[in-house]
């Protein structure tokens, strides 16, 4: 604020009219120290700045000064800056405050859109103001003139609008909507709205909104995504199908599983039709389909044109379109609704795997399936198969896996013996009451799952099943496993007979490979015979039986990891809740006091309740086993054995890991002896006098120094001997016909010896023979004639070169077939390799 007073008494000086003059370029710098008059250009828009004395102020060009844009009502030219007073006492020019002119009182008229007049900056202003700065002011005189012009134009437009109502409208020019007409229309609408509101009932609260009721048809047709909220399911769209078809033509594998299909798409049936416009897969790279996976759909039948019942070889020579899927090797249709099969499936000569599980197929489909002789894997689980399996099953000679679980089958045909390659059979959850013996004598079955059937009484009616490794018989009504009380299962690893009615199990001493034994929910009152000899047993479950005591020698079963004894009436109830490690530790502590001096009477249990202790501390287990192994014996005390046998029935005698040089003849005094183990001794000449063992079934002589069969054949009489183990000895020469001396022999092990010759007669009647790692130089072709009786033959690691290793690895059937093919026909001359000229 300036401290100076006005120099006149007229009040604030008014703006002096500016005399027009020639426009000169603005000075770049103006001095404010020299008194006198200063000329101000009409184009200058800067306001006066009061600058203190003694301070040099630099004047900036007018174009560099930025002004705030004015509103539409303020867009009026401001008064020109007045000149400074000439008689001011100070050196600084003071500018009196100017009064606003009457022209600035009124805002610029706002014209309608059609009559708006563009404002153009004056030339004088263009010279001093930047182009980006909006022109917001006019001179006082020019602003008043513009206002009058706009008012005149508005009146003229109103008169023209009034006259246009009576004048005819031109077709060429569209009518203009005037502002007055628009105003009248708005007023009319407002009045109509007011009248409408007056007719309504007054409300004191906000009216409720009416609910939007959607169309039920619209709701029914809308997909809310509830069936697949995470967008994980297959949509089965045409694009997806086309993508899979293109991939199938390239790699031969078609996957249309879980696409919600009710029939085979036409695109699949015509996937090999030539299309010149299809550039996805080069026609030269198209391959035949080998795998079709169409599982988990809704197929009820297969189209006839997919698998026509025609001869494929004849169709190949025909000009008509032949079958497109003749090269199928794997066909998966599980999880559909099939009720019948195409007859043309029998024409698939390369089909090896067929999965028809979880459909609704009747038993009659086997008439078609059994004609596919190339099948190696057939699955018909959970269908509507009911009744007896037809004898045509024998046609599937290449079958290795058969799954028939979850049906209502009542029997298998004896013709199952023709399935010489069958390894796995699943017949659980059916109504079978018995199985043919041919399944165990002629078929090299490895896995048998027969749970939840109608088996009762005895299951096995044979003496040995050499290849069986896994047997499931739970949830049946079996009372015993075999009729004879002893069955040889040398390869058995897993046995499940839980939930039956068994009161005893056969002798397990020959089940040397057993690792899992499940016999829960039966009626066993004692541990099975031979249970303590199972050195590879890891899991044993005796839940829900009638066991009342345990043999403390369980503690010596080093491989045993899980022993379950729950729900048994044991005298020591603590065993029911103890883990296996604690049970073995507790039982082991009960063995130790017996090893102390005889003068000590302290014991943990009553020995008479657990075992029978006799001469020299010998113990007989409840299973009738007398174990004298690891005793460093060089001979057996015959008097002690006789005395012991008069009071006990010894059924198994273990003498392995000693230093015996002969078979103890006193064994003949054990009239109930069935198992004799003399493994890992120093026996060279087994016998020098006759020895009769009428009930002996298993004889183990492995790990000795026996060099000949003569002593055994001459002096040993064992008419019921079934298992003879002579492995890891020093046997040489040719193998004799052992069935002449031991007529019941079925399992013979003589591996790791020096046997040089094996004849067809020496293997007559045997079922399992192991002659691996010997010096056999040639296999007689007539050995192949034992097909059907000889179910296991191991001859690896010998000197002969044919059959080669690839044939040996395929198994016994491949070896016997190879040998049988080498037998010359009757019309050919048979040359003996040892004869001259051979």
Image: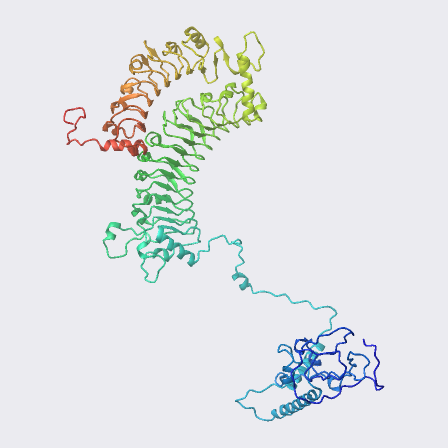
Q: Is residue 752 above or below residue 827?
A: above
Q: Nearer the viewer, residue 497 or 74?
A: 74
Quadrant location, the N terminus: bottom right
Which percent across, then down, holds residue 298? 43, 52
Q: Quadrant of residue 457?
A: top left
Which percent across, then down, holds residue 165? 61, 91
Query: Does residue 580 appear to the left or right of 366 in the view shown?
Result: right
Q: Is residue 81 above or below residue 446?
A: below
Q: Is residue 518 above or below residue 136?
A: above
Query: Does residue 266 appear to the left or right of 142 in the view shown?
Result: left
Quadrant location, the C terminus: top left
Q: Is residue 810 above or below residue 30?
A: above
Q: Nearer the viewer, residue 146 or 673?
A: 146
Q: Residue at x 36, y 29 (%)?
A: 467
Q: Nearer the viewer, residue 266 or 504?
A: 266
Which percent across, then down, holds residue 449? 42, 34
Q: Residue at x 60, y 65 (%)?
A: 213
Q: Nearer the viewer, residue 328 or 117?
A: 117
Residue that protrudes farthest toward the right in the picture: 9
Query: Does residue 458 appear to the left or right of 139 in the view shown?
Result: left
Residue 547 visible from this viewpoint = yes
How many labels, in total?
Answer: 0
The colour scheme of the drawn protein is: rainbow
Q: Residue at x 26, y 50 (%)?
A: 312
Residue that protrudes farthest toward the top in the picture: 639
Residue 736 visible from this viewpoint = no
Q: Quadrant of residue 352?
A: top left
Which percent across, then down, holds residue 561? 51, 27
């Amino acid at each position: 604020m300036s401290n100076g007073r006005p120099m006149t008494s007229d009040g604030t000086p008014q703006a002096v009219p500016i005399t027009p003059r020639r426009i000169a370029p603005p000075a770049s710098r103006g001095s404010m120290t020299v008194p006198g008059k200063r000329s101000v250009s009409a184009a200058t828009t800067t306001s006066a700045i009061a600058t203190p004395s003694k301070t040099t102020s630099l004047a900036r060009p007018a174009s560099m000064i930025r002004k705030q844009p004015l509103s539409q009502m303020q867009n009026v030219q401001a008064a020109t800056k007045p000149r400074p007073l000439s008689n001011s006492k100070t050196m600084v020019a003071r500018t009196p405050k100017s009064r606003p002119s009457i022209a600035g009182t009124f805002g610029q008229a706002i014209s309608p859109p059609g009559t708006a007049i563009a404002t153009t900056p004056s030339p004088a202003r263009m010279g001093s103001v930047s182009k980006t700065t909006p022109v917001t002011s006019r001179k006082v005189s020019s602003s008043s003139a513009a206002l009058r012009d706009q008012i005149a134009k508005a009146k003229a437009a109103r008169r023209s609008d009034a006259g246009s109502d009576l004048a005819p409208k031109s077709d060429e020019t569209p009518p203009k909507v005037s502002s007055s007409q628009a105003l009248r229309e708005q007023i009319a609408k407002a009045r109509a709205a007011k009248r409408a509101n007056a007719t309504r009932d007054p409300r004191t609260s906000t009216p409720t909104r009416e609910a939007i009721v959607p169309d039920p048809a619209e709701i029914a047709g809308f997909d809310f995504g509830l069936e697949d909220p995470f967008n994980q399911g297959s949509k089965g769209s045409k694009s997806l199908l086309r993508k899979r078809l293109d991939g199938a033509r390239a790699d031969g594998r078609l996957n249309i599983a879980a696409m919600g299909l009710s029939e085979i798409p036409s695109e699949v049936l015509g996937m090999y039709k030539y299309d010149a416009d299809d550039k996805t897969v080069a026609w030269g790279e198209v391959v035949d389909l080998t795998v079709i996976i169409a599982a988990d759909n809704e197929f009820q039948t297969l189209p006839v044109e997919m698998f026509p019942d025609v001869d494929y070889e004849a169709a190949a020579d025909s000009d008509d379109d032949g079958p497109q899927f003749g090269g199928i090797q794997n066909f998966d249709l599980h999880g559909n609704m099939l009720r019948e099969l195409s007859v043309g499936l029998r024409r698939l000569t390369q089909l090896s795997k067929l999965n028809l599980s979880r459909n609704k197929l009747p038993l009659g489909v086997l008439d078609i399936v059994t004609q596919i002789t190339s099948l190696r894997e057939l699955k018909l689980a959970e269908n509507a198969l009911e009744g007896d399996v037809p004898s045509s099953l024998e046609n599937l000679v290449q079958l290795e896996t058969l799954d028939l679980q979850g049906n209502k089958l009542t029997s298998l045909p004896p013709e199952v013996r023709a399935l010489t390659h069958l390894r796995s059979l699943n017949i659980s959850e059916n109504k079978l009451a018995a199985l043919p013996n041919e399944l165990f004598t002629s078929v090299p079955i490895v896995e048998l799952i027969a749970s939840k059937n109608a088996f009762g009484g005895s299951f096995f009616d044979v003496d040995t099943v050499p290849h069986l490794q896994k047997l499931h018989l739970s949830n049946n009504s079996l009372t015993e496993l075999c009729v004879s009380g002893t069955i040889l299962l040398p390869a058995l690893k897993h046995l499940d007979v839980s939930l039956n009615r068994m009161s005893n199990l056969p002798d397990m001493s020959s089940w040397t490979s057993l690792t899992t034994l499940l016999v829960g929910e039966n009626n066993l009152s004692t541990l099975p015979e031979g249970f303590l000899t199972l050195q590879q047993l890891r899991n044993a479950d005796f839940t829900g039986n009638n066991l009342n005591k345990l043999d403390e020698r369980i503690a010596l079963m080093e491989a045993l990891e899980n022993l379950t004894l729950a729900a048994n009436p044991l005298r020591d109830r603590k065993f029911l809740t103890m883990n296996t490690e604690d049970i073995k530790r507790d039982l082991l502590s009960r063995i130790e006091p017996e090893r102390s001096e005889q003068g000590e009477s302290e014991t943990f249990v009553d020995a008479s309740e657990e075992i029978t202790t006799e001469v020299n501390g010998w113990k007989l287990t409840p299973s009738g086993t007398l174990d004298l192994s690891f005793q460093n014996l060089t001979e057996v005390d015959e008097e002690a054995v006789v005395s012991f046998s008069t009071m006990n029935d010894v059924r198994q005698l273990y003498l392995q890991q000693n230093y015996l040089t002969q078979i103890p003849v006193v064994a003949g005094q054990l009239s109930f002896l069935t198992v004799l183990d003399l493994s890992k001794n120093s026996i060279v000449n087994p016998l020098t006098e006759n020895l009769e063992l009428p009930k002996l079934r298993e004889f183990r002589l492995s790990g000795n120094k026996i060099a000949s069969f003569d002593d055994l054949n001459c002096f040993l009489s064992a008419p019921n001997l079934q298992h003879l183990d002579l492995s890891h000895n020093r046997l040489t020469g040719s193998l004799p016909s052992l069935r002449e001396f031991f007529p019941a022999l079925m399992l013979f092990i003589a591996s790791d010896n020096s046997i040089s010759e094996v004849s067809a007669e020496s293997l007559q009647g045997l079922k399992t023979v192991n002659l691996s790692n010997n010096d056999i130089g040639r296999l007689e072709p007539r050995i192949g004639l034992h097909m059907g009786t000889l179910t296991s033959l191991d001859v690896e690691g010998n000197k002969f070169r044919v059959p080669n290793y690839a044939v040996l690895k395929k198994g016994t059937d491949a070896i016997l077939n190879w040998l049988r093919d080498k037998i010359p026909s009757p019309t050919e001359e048979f040359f003996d390799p040892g004869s001259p000229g051979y």
